[in-house]
Amino acid sequence: MKESTRRFLVSAFQDYYSRADATLPPEFTSREWGFVEFSSGQDTFMKRHRAFGSEGELYDYLRGIAPAHAYYSVAYYEYPGAPKMKEKNWLKADLIFDIDSDHLPGDINSYADMLEKGKKETLKLLDFLVEDFGFREVDVHAVFSGGRGYHFHISDESVLDLGSAERREIVDYVSSRGLELSRIFYKKEIYGDAGTENAKIAVFPSDDEGGWGARINKYLISYLSSIAKEQEAVKILTGFKGIGKVTAGKIIDVFADDLQVAALRKGKMDSLVGIKREILETIVKQGVSQMAACVDEPVTADVKRLIRLPGSLHGKSGLRVTALSIDELESFEPLNDAVVFSDRSVKIKVIKPFAVQMKNRDFIVEEGVQELPEYVAVYLMCRGVAEYGSH
């Protein structure tokens, strides 16, 4: 970016930091800090291995340099300001999850659309953390990254000592990696009385057993019960590989019967005898892909990772990195609620056409000199598609 653009952005960020407070992490004096400043050159680099002994010292630093990006370590160190990692003496680390909206499957139509997809994925992950892992909602701290997605921060004592391998296992679980459906649908041996043969019956987890088994039970029953009520039920079911009209009719009969559904909820599959397990697994695979959460594994596994500071600004958008309660997360609108700059007009030179939706307005800008609200001008300059002024 040009020097005039850099100066404008530094001034705008300084004005923000002069009146804003960050959400500091627990034991912030035991964290390593890193910052990236705005640069008018091609090269940018992070100033890291910083440590602060008080809130005032940190805020003075933020207001002084007005960084483009501000980070702190998920790790707690004995000597966080030591210049080499091996000298810091790692103590423990928060459990962090990162969902990048642009890494999610499917088409993305706009920045707003991408962020909405990211929020839905984040809510899926939250369900795993609360329902499967038993974290209290008050212990799961959500953060909008200011850029492409959301983070969850967990500082509960039960996770602080986990190593990278254990953290990867958590990611594997929520993303369904390694899930074996043969362990969901299986044969259970029933021991007969003396003189009688043992028998094997088909079972699968009940809906109150917890874990992926319960999730699959609930999905299968909800999905097929819903289809059984449709006029086009046979047509829908025969769309699955291996399901003919006879099998479709049997599935409809079972899932339209409340008594048989109640038995299935308890894991009893007697009513599905004759329906090939492969057919049920095909249906369930669709549900697993919908229920699994898409999480950035390297972020969670890295026990020395630097993560964005809530309350700071994102230097590639100008949006606020926003801490959110769980109640706030669902209704949060990042392109409205994370906008911090004013409506005053700012003259910029647009380098290439760009479109963005902010504060419930659609902005489609063409090349050339434009006057736009400050919040849009800052966003475009941070994205590198505009320069400050008219030259």
Image (cartoon, helix red, strand yellow):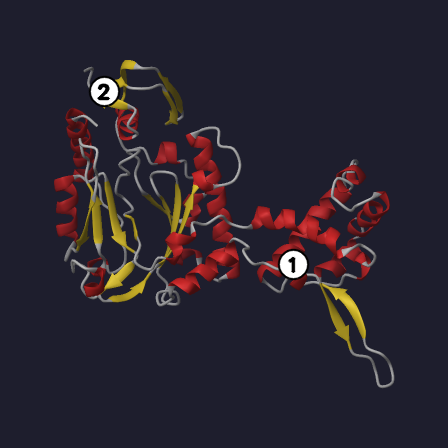
- Above/below status of 243 relative to 200: above
Q: Residues within 10 Å of mark 1 (few under 14, many from 20)?
A: many
**Residue 132 pos. (x, y %):** 52, 60
Q: Looking at the image, which is closer to me, 276 or 267?
A: 276
For image coordinates 17% across by 53% down, the residue present is: 55
Of 134 and 182, which appears nearest the observer?
Answer: 182
Give the mark, 2 or 1, whose residue is nearer the N terminus. Answer: 1
Foreground of the two, 7 or 131: 7
- Residue type (three-letter) at the residue carrying disc 1: Leu
Q: CA distance from mark 2 to mark 1?
A: 58 Å
Amino acid type assigned to the residue bearing label 2 in the image: Val
Which quadrant is the C terminus positioned in? top left
Q: Give above or below for 164 relative to 323.
A: below
Mark 2 burial class by Cα count in 10 Å: few <14, some 14-19, many 20+: some
Residue at the (79%, 37%) spot, across then down: 235
- Quarter of the picture holding the N terminus: top left
- Write the residue at 57% across / 61% down: 211
**In this picture, is 315 found above or below 139?**
above
Which residue matches tag 2? 346
**Quarter location, residue 214:** bottom right
User: Mark 1 sits on what residue?
Assistant: 181
Element type at mark 2: strand
Left-right relation of 231 to 95:
right
Residue 182 appears in the picture as rendered? yes
